[in-house]
Structure formats: structure tokens, C-alpha cells
Amino acid sequence: MLRKEEKRSLTKLALLLIGWGIGLDRFYEGRTRDAFLSLLGWSIIFFSLLLFSPCHGSNNLEGLKSYSDLALNPLIVLPISFGIYGGILVIRKAFRLLRSFENSD
């Protein structure tokens, strides 16, 4: 049987893996403000990726001969870098939860 600490870390890990983008793990921990900030941050990253993407549909690509003619918006670097940083934080938290599960006595 699993101990209470092991069950708690498995529950947090499951919530992190399923709902990391909407902050389900933080809602479960009772940190509502952090959960709303997580939801806001990931939605800003997602919508800014859509906004700064080089093409918003096939109508922009009709006269395009090759992808080298496509002008990239330099601001796309910001949401990509914030998304990578957020992904690293999610992976780091997952490993921390796995270590707490492994070290629970």
C-alpha cells in the first residue's frame, strides 16, 4: 500500500501532467493566485504565438514562392523563450515530485 505522502505526491504529479497549462496542480495545493497567474501566462504565450506567427492562414501564402520569402516577426522570440522557460519549470517540478515520492519513508 502507498503511504499518505506517496499518495499526495502521485496526485500532484498527475495533476501537473494533465493540467499544467491551466494550473490544476496549484489549485489543488490551494495556491489560487499562482494558479490564475499560470493560466494567464500560458494563455498569453499561446495567443502571442498565434499573433506573431509568420502566417495566419493560407491566404497569406498564395503569392509566396518559397519559405525564404516569408518575413518572420522578431517578436516571436519572446513567447517562444517564455514557453521554453515555462516548460523547463514544469519538468523541474515533475522531477521534484518524483524525488519526493522516492524519498518518502
Image (tube, helix red, strand yellow):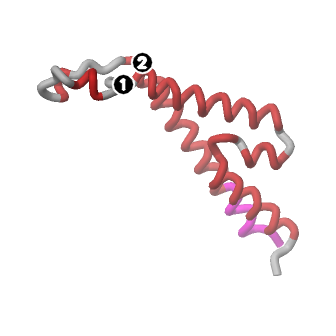
Q: Residue 88 carries which label?
A: none
* Residue 71 inside the magenta-drawn segment: no
Q: In this view, does 58 lie to the left or right of 14?
A: left
**Element carrying mark 2:** helix
- Residue farthest along the front direction in this orientation: 59
The residue range painted magenta reads: 96-105
Query: Residue 68: where, in percent of width, then height?
Result: 17, 25
Q: In this view, does 57 lie to the left or right of 96?
A: left
Q: How many angstroms separate mark 1 from mark 2 (CA)?
A: 15 Å
Q: Mark 2 points at which residue?
A: 75
Q: In which quarter of the image is residue 38?
A: top right
Q: Nearer the viewer, mark 1 or mark 2?
A: 1
Q: Residue at x 61, y 49 (%)?
A: 92
Q: Residue 56 carries which label?
A: 1
Q: Residue at x 69, y 62 (%)?
A: 99
Q: What residue type is labelled 1?
A: His
